[in-house]
Image (cartoon, rainbow, N blue to C red):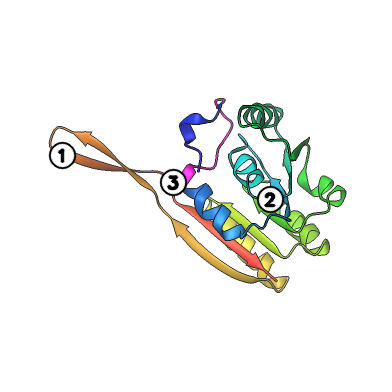
């Protein structure tokens, strides 16, 4: 995994943290022939990591800052097997022929998942921070007859203080893996 500190960052544009990227990439079970859709690409952390393992990536985000940041990181890490699109994922999904998807964040999550299902995407990994979103995603996936695995990940980093080391936690992330 590429260290978070190596990515170009822009304030207000999220990045999937290194340890979460590692787990999410593993849950995607990427094969060299896969064509993957990265929805809510943010800073492009997942886009870059996915691109090193598959045939092609389509990255989508509704933020121009996110698109610009992803493009800068693709250039920095010499990613050539990816196209980046600005817009609402629910409106763009029909343009892509993919077999797997990663959702790091999006509006209209129900429509997005339903459209992925209609396109016969059989492996979807979704990261959520908000508990209500996790519940909503699980309910949608169950209704669509996906097999679901849910894990909650809390990463803490040690920081030296005068009396020893203190662990500083990051936000817990729920990683939902859906397969058919």
Residue 89: give x, y in percent of width and height: 77, 46
Q: Are marks 2 and 3 in contact (CB under 8 Å)?
A: no
Query: Would residue 175 be counted in the magenta stretch?
Result: no
Instruction: Tell me if 19 is positioned left or right of 98 in this view.
Output: left
Residue 23: give x, y in percent of width and height: 51, 54
Is disc 2 placed on a helix, strand or loop? Answer: loop
Q: Which residue is mark 3?
A: 171
Q: Quadrant of residue 66?
A: top right
Q: Is residue 30 above or below residue 168?
A: below
Residue 166 or residue 26, whichever sits in front? 26
Residue 81 or residue 68, whichever sits in front? 81
Residue at the extreme left of the image, as rendered: 163
Local packing at callout 3 (Cα closer than 10 Å; few below 14, some 14-19, many 20+) is: few
Residues under labels 1 and 3: Cα distance?
23 Å
Camera-nearest label, 2 or 3 = 2
Q: Earlier in the sequence, mark 2 or mark 1?
A: 2
Query: Would residue 16 be counted in the magenta stretch?
Result: yes
- Residue at horizontal 58 percent and vertical 39 percent from the top: 45
Camera-nearest label, 2 or 1 = 2
Q: Which residue is mark 2?
A: 54
- Residue at horizontal 54 percent and vertical 30 percent from the top: 7
Q: Is residue 84 above or below residue 112?
A: above
Q: Earlier in the sequence, mark 1 or mark 3?
A: 1
Q: Is residue 132 visible?
A: no
Q: Main secondary structure of the magenta part?
A: loop
Q: Quadrant of residue 138?
A: bottom right
Residues under labels 2 and 1: Cα distance?
43 Å
- Residue at horizontal 54 percent and vertical 25 percent from the top: 11
Residue 12: give x, y in percent of width and height: 57, 29
Q: Which residue is mark 1?
A: 164
Q: Earlier in the sequence, mark 2 or mark 3?
A: 2
Q: Is residue 72 visible?
A: yes
């Amino acid at each position: 995994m590429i260290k978070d500190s190596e990515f170009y960052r822009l304030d207000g544009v999220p990045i999937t943290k290194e340890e979460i990227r590692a787990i999410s990439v593993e849950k995607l079970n990427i094969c060299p022939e896969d064509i993957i859709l990265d929805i809510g690409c943010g800073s492009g952390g997942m886009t870059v990591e996915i691109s090193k393992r598959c045939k092609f990536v389509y990255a989508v985000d509704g933020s121009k800052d996110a698109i610009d940041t992803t493009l800068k990181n693709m250039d920095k890490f010499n990613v050539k097997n990816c196209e980046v699109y600005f817009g609402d994922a629910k409106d763009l999904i029909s343009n892509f022929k993919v077999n797997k998807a990663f959702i790091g964040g999006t509006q209209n999550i129900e429509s997005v998942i339903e459209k992925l299902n209609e396109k016969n995407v059989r492996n979807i990994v979704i990261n959520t921070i908000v508990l209500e979103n996790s519940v909503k995603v699980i309910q949608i996936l169950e209704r669509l007859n996906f097999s679901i695995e849910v894990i909650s990940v809390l990463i803490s980093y040690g920081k030296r203080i005068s009396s020893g080391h203190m662990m500083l936690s990051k936000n817990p992330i729920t990683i939902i893996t859906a397969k058919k």
